Image (cartoon, helix red, strand yellow):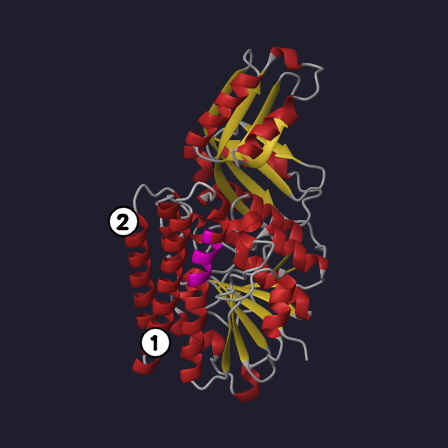
């Protein structure tokens, strides 16, 4: 028997009681309940409290601890996170015994983490030890709290409903930490029989490689993909709170969007580049190399097949999705650049050092422009470093946006020409446009205020007007 490995994100996890009645159980019974392994994220918002807010940067426990002038900030942040976690499981658990069990589990993990942080702080008061050397481990310890809590809560909820659910805790709590991710997964799944029980697996896995070193908060999808590859899953499934559609329905209208239905990993990579991740690109690579197809579904519509992502080409060239991203254009103009090598490498070194993500770039004889996903504050530091390297250069950062038309195959569609015309017909101007020879995406550079109307115009031109449009999203 081959199994599916299925991941549930944090926003959907906050409604896990509703998922019990649809996704986990629904109209299934007895043997039909099993053959599925679920990898769960922390409840919505919890990782923000344990680390820092993903969008605003507001400090959580980790950020407070790493930058602490005193003990008060991180202790209060940990108390606040614990309160939010308790409210999360009280919201979905109904039986008093289950709530009591979750309370006890949470208390043990929170106080264990607190004591660990206190001891480390005391140790690092001696000159031979540096807190900075342990920050990554602290970040992983705190992240694991969220996933272990949500996995335990889900297991209790399902067991109370008569499901033979089993907690598979990969967080390494009080375990030997010097093992690889593959060994952690293999050891944890040993003796687990997905044919007769439903494994509920933590999205965070403690391992010698340190998942957060490379993937930071994308670790749960890496765990999910590696587990799917390890067991040779029939499919890897990501359950989101929406369908993967041709555009944001809040932007172009619910009636205008089309559910993708099917696409490939090339498109998934382009979506990741535009900040609209169907799956972390490294996780997609793992699935792709192990011939495991990926399916993205709406968690609350379990009978809808969602969107299948594999390596199959399309029979008909088409724009499948239109999306966009706010960016900053970093422009380096240097008259002496003409015919000289090395400028681009030096700029890339500076961007890498400041952890700036590059979305796209263009260059000519004396100008190199990188379109990056970053803040102006970070870019000011980048500009300062570049000015030190090239004092004669004119270096500027400008807030812009990029709209992208993406598809498995755009050959013969004149997307660049038609896209520029659609934007112009809507009353706007593209400041730049790029199309690579692989023909899977075309990017249009715009003023920020023009992004949303440009996406609407591109969607209308390429998807709504197409006679080959995919079925409408449910």
Q: Is residue 318 magenta?
A: no
Dividing the picture into quarters, in which one does residue 126 lie? top left
Q: Is residue 327 placed above or below 126 in the rendered structure?
A: above
Q: Nearer the viewer, residue 353 or 17?
A: 353
Percent position (x, y) of residue 174? 49, 66
Percent position (x, y) of residue 47? 41, 56
Q: Nearer the viewer, residue 269 or 223?
A: 223
Q: Is residue 158 placed above or below 53 in the rendered structure?
A: below
Q: Is residue 32 placed above or below 366 in the rendered structure?
A: below
Q: Residue at x 53, y 17 (%)?
A: 388
Percent position (x, y) of residue 185? 61, 67
Label 2 to label 1, Cα distance in Å?
Answer: 32 Å
Q: Is disc 1 placed on a helix, strand or loop? A: loop
Report the predominant secondary structure element of the magenta stretch. Answer: helix
Q: Is disc 2 placed on a helix, strand or loop? A: helix
Give the labeled residue for mark 2.
Answer: 72
Mark yes or no: residue 345 visible: yes
Mark yes or no: residue 261 visible: no
Q: Callout 1 environment at 10 Å: few (<14), some (14 to 19), or many (20+)?
A: many
Left or right of residue 163, residue 68 in this image: left
Q: Nearer the viewer, residue 408 or 159?
A: 159
Give the labeled residue for mark 1.
Answer: 93
Percent position (x, y) of residue 298? 49, 65
Give me the disc on residue 102: none
Q: Which span of residues is magenta-colored?
A: 138-145
Q: Of circles 2 and 1, which is in front?
A: 2
Q: Is residue 144 magenta?
A: yes
Q: Earlier in the sequence, mark 2 or mark 1?
A: 2
Dividing the picture into quarters, in which one does residue 92 lie? bottom left
Q: Callout 2 environment at 10 Å: few (<14), some (14 to 19), or many (20+)?
A: few
Q: Residue at x 48, y 25 (%)?
A: 397
């Amino acid at each position: 028997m081959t199994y599916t490995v299925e991941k549930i994100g944090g926003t959907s996890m906050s409604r896990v009681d509703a998922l019990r009645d649809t996704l986990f159980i629904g109209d299934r019974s007895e043997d039909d309940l099993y053959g599925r392994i679920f990898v769960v994220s922390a409840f919505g918002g919890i990782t923000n409290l344990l680390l820092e807010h993903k969008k605003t940067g507001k400090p959580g426990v980790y950020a407070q601890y790493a930058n602490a002038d005193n003990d008060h900030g991180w202790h209060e942040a940990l108390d606040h996170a614990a309160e939010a976690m308790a409210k999360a499981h009280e919201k979905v658990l109904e039986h008093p015994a289950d709530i009591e069990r979750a309370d006890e589990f949470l208390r043990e993990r929170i106080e264990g983490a607190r004591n660990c942080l206190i001891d480390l702080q005391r140790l690092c008061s001696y000159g031979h030890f540096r807190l900075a050397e342990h920050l990554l481990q602290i970040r992983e310890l705190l992240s694991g709290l969220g996933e272990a809590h949500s996995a335990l809560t889900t297991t209790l909820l399902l067991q109370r409903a008569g499901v033979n659910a089993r907690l598979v805790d990969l967080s390494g709590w009080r375990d030997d930490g010097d093992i690889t991710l593959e060994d952690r997964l293999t050891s944890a799944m040993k003796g687990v029989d997905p044919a007769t029980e439903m494994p509920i697996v933590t999205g965070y896995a403690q391992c010698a490689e340190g998942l957060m070193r490379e993937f930071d908060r994308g670790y749960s999808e890496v765990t999910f993909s590696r587990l799917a590859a390890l067991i040779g899953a029939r499919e890897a499934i990501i359950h989101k709170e929406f369908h993967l559609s041709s555009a944001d329905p809040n932007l172009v209208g619910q009636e205008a969007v089309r559910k993708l239905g099917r696409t490939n990993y090339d498109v998934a990579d382009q979506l990741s580049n535009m900040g609209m991740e169907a799956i972390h690109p490294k996780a997609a690579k793992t699935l792709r190399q192990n011939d495991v197809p990926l399916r993205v579904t709406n968690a609350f519509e379990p009978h809808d097949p969602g969107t299948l992502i594999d390596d199959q080409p399309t029979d008909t060239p088409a724009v499948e999705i239109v999306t966009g991203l706010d960016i900053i254009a970093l422009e380096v103009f240097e008259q002496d650049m003409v015919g000289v090598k090395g400028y681009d490498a030096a700029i890339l070194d500076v961007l890498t050092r400041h952890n700036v993500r590059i979305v796209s770039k263009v260059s000519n004889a004396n100008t190199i422009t990188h379109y990056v996903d970053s803040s102006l504050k970070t870019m000011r530091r980048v500009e300062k470093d570049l000015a030190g390297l090239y004092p004669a250069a004119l270096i500027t950062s400008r807030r812009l946006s990029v709209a992208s038309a993406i598809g498995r195959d755009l050959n013969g569609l004149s997307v660049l020409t038609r896209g520029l015309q659609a934007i112009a017909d809507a009353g706007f101007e593209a400041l730049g446009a790029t199309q690579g020879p692989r023909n899977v995406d075309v990017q249009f550079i715009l003023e920020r205020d023009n992004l949303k109307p440009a996406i609407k115009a591109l969607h209308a031109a390429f998807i709504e007007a197409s006679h080959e449009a995919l079925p409408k999203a449910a």
